[in-house]
Amino acid sequence: MQDTLEKNELLIEGETGPWEMIIGMEVHAQVTSNAKLFSGASTAFGGDPNSHVSLVDAAMPGMLPVINEECVAQAIRTGLGLKAEINLYSIFDRKNYFYPDLPQGYQISQYKQPIVGEGEVIVDLLDGSRVVVGIERLHLEQDAGKSLHDQHPKKSFVDLNRSGVALMEIVSKPDLRSSEQAKAYVSKLRTILRYLGTCDGNMEEGSLRADVNVSVRRPGDPLGTRCEIKNVNSIRFIGQAIEYEARRQIEILEEGGEIHQETRLFDAKTGETRSMRSKEEAHDYRYFPDPDLLPLELTQGWVDSLAADLCELPDEKRERFIAEFGLSPYDASVLVAEKERADYFEAVAEGRDGKLAVNWVNNELFGRLNKESLGIAESPVSADQLGKLIDLIKDGTISGKIAKDVFDIVWSEGGEPADIVEARGLRQVTDTGAIEAAVDEVIAANPDKVEQAKAKPQMIGWFVGQVMKASGGKANPQAVNALLKSKLGVE
Amino acid sequence: MTELTDLTIAEARAALDKKEFSAKELAEAHLGAIEAANGALNAYVLATPDQALAMAARSDERLANGEAGALEGIPLGIKDLFCTQGVPTTACSHILEGFTPTYESTVTQNLWNAGAVMLGKLNNDEFAMGSSNETSYFGPAANPWRREGSDAKLVPGGSSGGSAAAVAARLCMGATATDTGGSIRQPAAITGTVGIKPTYGRCSRWGIVAFASSLDQAGPIARDVRDAGLLLNAMASFDPKDTTSVDRAVPDYTAELDAGVKGLTIGVPKEYRIEGLRPEIAALWDKGVEWLKAAGANIVEVSLPHTKYALPSYYIIAPAEASSNLARYDGVRYGLRVEGEDVTSMYENTREAGFGAEVKRRILIGTYVLSAGYYDAYYLKAQKVRTLIKRDFDTAFESCDAILAPATPSPAFAMGEKTGDPLEMYLNDIFTVTVNMAGLPGISVPAGLSSEGTPLGLQVIGRPFDEATMLRAGRAIEIAAGPLARPEDWWSKAA
């Protein structure tokens, strides 16, 4: 969807000239639901091996799959969040292959007629540019179990807790042109899924993983042969894998070789990709419609009711923050990247100065949280406390500088900002008499500086600093400034 | 004792109410018959006398307390394809040897809920793949019937051969069976019993070892139409655990059994008069038409033009589904495991040793027709044929209420007679597969004896979920045909 000619900065310079990367992603997102896609077994993470396994998950003879309505609803919500077409008629197919952690000998998936069709994701990049990534489809499928090869010298063990858990496979179009774009796309997708509550997006627990398709070509040429890097499980690794893979392919092509379509694995230790199986070794999955399941037929009414209950999505929230609170696009993007942050901001900004609020949330609060590796939910300063602190600045009770001290006290000791200001005597001095006395004192003590200031009005800043110091930082800086100007006779 | 095993289910149930004998005595009579006969007939792969007597004792309590169910105390045999809790279930395959389910199939649970008593597990073709019961890992069941003047053992048909043989030989009052391409109706026809293949979705498939999911359907085999209806009353249900089961009330299939066929229109499909049809089968069919006409039915000729494509299409779809359904028998979790160097060789060794030749043949056919490059030419085309076959029946049922056809192309054949030629074996299904392909109900009713003195059956095909009308027509044939001779008991003597 991008015009390659306008995006020259994305090209990679090889030995023999520039190359363009073409990247498409298949993201596997675990559906947030209490039960598996076709059985009533729990989907809770952790738990002893094989403790969340029903007769269906273990593929006992005569067992039959029954679709879990909540998983279908989650797929539809996700499709709506991706601005995608919802297919009212879809079909579950069997993908046949043998593996010990696949008890049925087939995975129930959707092949030719998925539940969700074409959609799009808008990705905002750090440089302020924006890429629209096409979504090809989203389908529902079962996860496999887990083979454990390190428990016994000669045997492998199988844990079926994950077997049958619902996954959404979200397939993008080959619209991505750099590892930065690919990483930003996965981040954005994860944000959308978390907003919707359809996937927790936890990559460490395997709730979100990506297969990355990479090819390279000369700008303007037809698409090159792609390689698929399987199961990359962190955003950083996605970037590394793409960079490595693109350079590997360019090297081969520049040496006159050709790329063979294959499946590769990313090794996080070495940062390299290595061949897993070639196209010739690829499985023939013998897809066919699962005869145990009827076609999935949805009513438009149900889809509409899910759409009506959909939460505000990040793009909409970003636009609203810009319009409602006067935020810069950058600040708004930072806030909406995480729903909890956006919610926190909104609680602070409600009825207050939006710009002041975003400065405090994005800079002071997020800076401190990042420094201490805390999530927004663990913030020692609540939105209510921060809001009240901002109120104290706004009504002139304290200065911005004092407010930072109060923030530190709330952070480490808790308490209401107003109480802290009172108890510690931090209230800003706006009593002109008291300020005037301090000003007079400083002027009297520094006649030489007074003379200099008359010639060089910038010197006034030094006087302000002296007065503020004398007042213990509590004097109102505007009042100090005004008094000094009149007494020194400078403008 | 012989007298008790001769009773029909309806008679026995009434007698139990009147306390003429106890459920325990009824169970014991059948357990004795099994004991005496099974060496010769091999109808049961597992008798469960302890279970039977315990269930009968509970039935007697309920009979005494006035809490008796519709099938209270009725001793039944269960095809080994039905999972039975705590009782080994093997589908008569080596690969499931030693497997004991921790769960009960919905159909058998329904029967126990109605008060029925389990005598044991019945022989069948391995994974229900066969028409003679000769592919069973436990050896073939024998047909109680023999050709006049011959001691040669005949097959009881398949795949529900053990069910049909046990019912015909009075080793149970009725049996469960399953029908994927004719596996209830064909054995019923050639053992002189009544077999019902209900509409697809009428009985739950939950807990039945799957062969071909879109075709498999459970049904009863009994000695007369009423008994078969009584069993179906209990077996049929909507089951939320089976997505393909249909949420429809189950009528009393015996309520209008004797309403007759007066005013009904019976269709006779011209395409079933196939080339090379045995004259005695054609004659029996003609006789059936005359019987129904005499009983007041209107007879019309109907056309089912895609009939000749049904069998080849069936032998694409059923193996395709089977190849996938049987993938779970991999030696990893239950049943047989033959170790190997690595996991792939373990799979190979297990499946090589665990599956018989016919099962392997069908897995290979099914894998082939689903393979990349062949899918469209075979599987997809077969599915299109299936749609046309359904449409044929829809059109035919616009002008008739039920269809009359032969059940099998021949009477019972000898053991070993067709095992060398799979195609000839597959031809046994020629009159029955269309019904599975279209998801319709069909019943096979004994209608006479062949020139060899062995039973022949006629088949009535009904509209979807109109088993009641189908049973009325079946009952009319049963009345017209009169009581069938019964096979001479050679098996007990041999025991």
Image: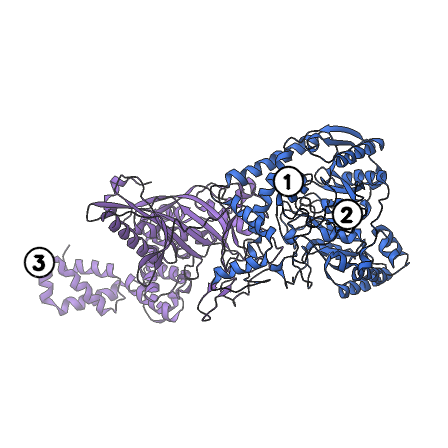
Chain colours: A purple, B blue
According to the picture, the residue beneath numbered tag 1 turns out to be B437
Which chain letter matches label 3? A
CA distance separating discs 1 and 2: 24 Å
Question: Residue type at mark 1?
Answer: Met
Question: Residue type at mark 2?
Answer: Thr
Regarding residue B70, the answer to whether it shows in the image is yes
Q: Quick check: B73 left or right of B215?
A: right
Which element is circle 1 on?
helix
Dot in front, 1 or 3: 1
For the N terminus of chain A, which image quadrant?
top left
CA distance separating discs 3 and 2: 125 Å
Regarding residue A361, the answer to whether it shows in the image is no
- List x then y, in percent, for residue B55: 78, 62
Characterize the local packing of mark 1: few (<14), some (14-19) or many (20 or more) Cα atoms within 10 angstroms. Answer: many
Question: Residue type at mark 3?
Answer: Ala
Residue nearest the viewer, comparing B309 with A347: B309
Which chain letter matches label 2? B
Mark 3 vs 2: CB contact within 8 A: no
- List x then y, in percent, for residue B37: 79, 59
Q: Quick check: B432 left or right of B359?
A: right
Dot in front, 1 or 2: 2
Residue nearest the viewer, comparing B320 with B421: B421
Q: Quadrant of residue A398?
A: bottom left
CA distance separating discs 1 and 3: 105 Å
According to the picture, the residue beneath numbered tag 3 turns out to be A455
- List x then y, in percent, for residue B130: 65, 49
Does label 1 or label 2 sit earlier along the sequence? 2
Say which mark, if any, is on residue B191. Answer: 2
